[in-house]
Image (tube, rainbow, N blue to C red):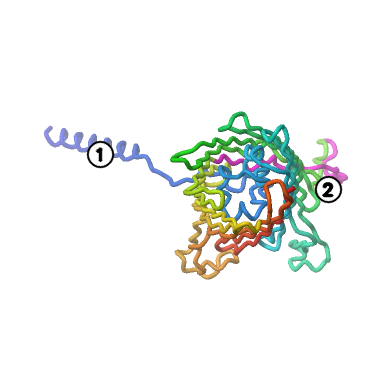
Amino acid sequence: MHNRSLFIAVALLSAASGVASAQVVRQIPSDNTAYGTTAAEFLLLAPTARGMALGNSFSALVTDISALYFNPAGLSQMARPELTASSTSYIAETKYSYVGVALPFGGGSRAVGFSIGSFGFNDQPVYTVEDPTGTTGEVYSVSETFIGLTYSQQFSDRFAAGFTAKYISDKLGDVSGTAFAVDFGTSFHANIGGRPIRAAFTIQNLGSTLQHTGKALNALVNREPPADQQGIPQEPAAASLRSKEWQLPIQFRVALAYDLFSTSMSRFSLMGEFTQPNNNDPQFSFAGEYDVRLGGSGFSLAPRVSYTYQPANSLDPAGATSANYAGFNTAVSSGSDGLAFGGGIKYRKTPRSFGFGVDYAYRNFGLLGNINTVSLGLTW
């Protein structure tokens, strides 16, 4: 009897141990970030050299025509009409071109603007399973374009707001799609210790989805014959496939800018910005800009530098030991990824006279290479 009781006790303990083991929760590492789930990502490219040199982190500081992209609220703080044009030779032999014009009115408390940007490439060979070397002579092109209209207004001496309505066209080879989006921005400006401090909140590309159509989606589909015609050949039916509806790359940005010193002849500003996109990890950027007038010549110089921390760019596929991963040399140090710098030179004799300027920016994209941007500007 004693042995039988001991056996039952051991069996119950074993069963209880099995239940306890079955209840252990296994944590499976996961990342729910929606990488690669948006279209028209060219909307995230900085269109001006000043913006690229500052790592896109100056939405709180911007009070010139760059506000058309970075923060519509800053446009109403622009003193005179401005025109800008820029060209960027981007990654993988692509090109991004941008033009913007802005006009203040209402005694300087309001402004309107127009901008257009185009990204893409032309006449690339078509590679297929049947023709992996692209020798047929067939080519394709990509052309992504947006057109934006901006309105901005100062509501008080410390607060301004603005918005940009955008029409987006996305042509990828033989398919294309369109979408509409809105950028909205605010700007708060005050003084601390007698020096300007500015804060900004912006949201970009909030709008419709983008769905592609075109002849590349046309297909012949083999129909299932009726039950009474089994075995009889059927003519294929013409059909148009439906592509997925893609979201636009939305960004929410919070920025702060503070002038360490500001006089009639020079200014040194520090900037920081937090960016939360809907298709990537959050990003942080820090920047500095020193603007100095060269006496009474009318010329001014503005060196700039920035660094952007992008967690998703920390690619280490083989413990940094592989020299070739997906065609990229991973042995190259990516420690400078996110570093950008540049500068500008401007001429304007008096606040109401004609002026012009040239800006340059260099940006390091780690394994993807380097980018150079040049912008030209006119003020009248």
Residue flagged by tag 2: what amino acid is it?
Lys
Q: Is residue 90 left or right of residue 278?
A: right
Question: Marks 2 and 1, Cα distance to the nearest angstrom?
Answer: 66 Å
The residue under label 1 is which amino acid type? Ser
Which image quadrant is residue 95 in? bottom right
Camera-side residue of 277 and 79: 79
Marks 2, 1: nearer the viewer: 2
The residue stretch that appears in magenta: 228-253
**Residue lying farthest to the top in this orientation:** 155
Placement of 328 over or under 347, stated as above or below = below
Is residue 230 covered in magenta? Answer: yes
Question: Which of the 4 image quadrants contains residue 148?
Answer: top right
Residue at the spot x=72%, y=38% of the render?
Answer: 104
Q: Is residue 348 visible?
A: yes
Q: Is residue 117 visible?
A: no
Foreground residue among 218 and 110:
110
Give the structural element (helix, strand or loop) at label 2.
helix
Q: Given the current orientation, which residue lies at the most extreme front position?
A: 296
Residue closer to the observer: 239 or 338 = 338
Task: Write the residue at 81% across / 51% down.
Answer: 174
Dot 2 or dot 1: first in sequence order is: 1
Residue 220 position, x and y percent, is: 83, 47
Q: Residues within 10 Å of mark 1 (few under 14, many from 20)?
A: few
Q: Which mark is residue 14?
A: 1
Left or right, 358 with respect to 124, comes to left
Q: Label 2 neighbourhood size at 10 Å, few (<14), some (14-19), many (20+)?
A: few
- Which residue is denoted by mark 2 in the rendering? 215
The answer to if 50 sits in the magenta stretch is no
Rendered position, 11 above or below 310 = above
Q: Position of residue 195 (x, y in %)?
A: 48, 42
Residue 210 x, y percent position in the rendering: 72, 40
